[in-house]
Image (cartoon, helix red, strand yellow):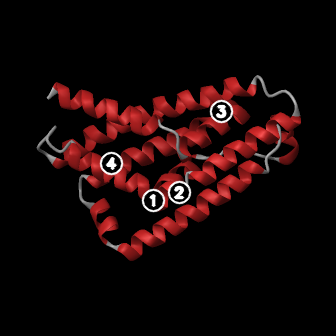
Amino acid sequence: MFDQFFALVLFALIATGSPGGATTLATASGARFGLLRSIPLITGIALTLSGLVAVSCSGLATTLQAAPALNLIVKALGTVYLLWLAVKLGFSGAPNTINANGERPLSFINGAMLLLVNPKAWAMALGVASSFSQLVSDPILLGGLLAAVFALSALLSLTFWALTGRLVSRVLSADWHWHIFNGGMAGLLAVSILQLWV
């Protein structure tokens, strides 16, 4: 039992901390707005991920994967949403232009939408639910346990990435540094779209 729980925690930390769309947005948000103003985005991602994992225990994710047309629609929506975020990030300036442009950090809803329209997140949640189904026999308790582990892991991982972004921002002194950083983050976000289709 302990070995399975340890494996679950390790898997959750690796899954939530590995580079992808969520970690890219957390890094960019941390660099531009700092950790405190990035908390709504981080919380939206973490709680939605934990909800997907809990719902997967009830079989909803299986329905999504079993319906190719629905899966294709979700992929297309996810692609459009991620491209919109990448363009928005790519054209943002240095933090000293934030107040002048009225720019605000991504919200809780933005973080939630990132996960809801991401078939990769649904597939991962389904895989977790089936892989660790032996931890607890009751599906509701299993869903609660998996949701809690993934919520905490995502909060820790995304906080780390936001703090990393904040540290990086200290060496970005000129406007052109920020244009390169924002362009790089936008490019990584756009490349993460490939994960939806591969």
Q: Amino acid at mark 1?
A: Val
Q: Is residue 76 above or below residue 177?
A: below
Figure check: 22 above or below 8 = below
Q: Which quadrant would the N terminus be assigned to in this image? A: top left
Q: Which element carries disc 3, helix, strand or loop?
A: helix
Q: Disc 1 marks which residue?
A: 198
Label 3 close to label 1 by CB (< 8 Å): no
Amino acid type shown at disc 3: Gly
The alpha-carbon separation of the residues under discs 3 and 2 comes to 24 Å
The amino acid type found where label 4 is placed reads Val
Of badges 3 and 1, nearer the viewer stands 1
Few, some or many residues within 10 Å of mark 4 (<14, 14–19, 20+): many
Residue visible at 86% across and 37% down in the picture? 176
Residue 85 against residue 34 in the figure, above or below: below
Q: Is residue 151 left or right of residue 140?
A: right
Q: Which mark is residue 194?
A: 2
Foreground mark, 2 or 4?
2
Determine if residue 117 is in view: no
Q: Secondary structure at mark 4?
A: helix
Determine if residue 50 is in view. Answer: yes
Residue receiving disc 4? 53
Give the residue at x 48% y 58%: 196
Mark 3 or 2: in front is 2
Q: Which disc number belongs to residue 30?
A: 3
- The reply to whether discs 1 and 2 touch (Cβ–Cβ < 8 Å) is yes
| Distance from the alpha carbon under mark 3 to that under mark 1 | 29 Å
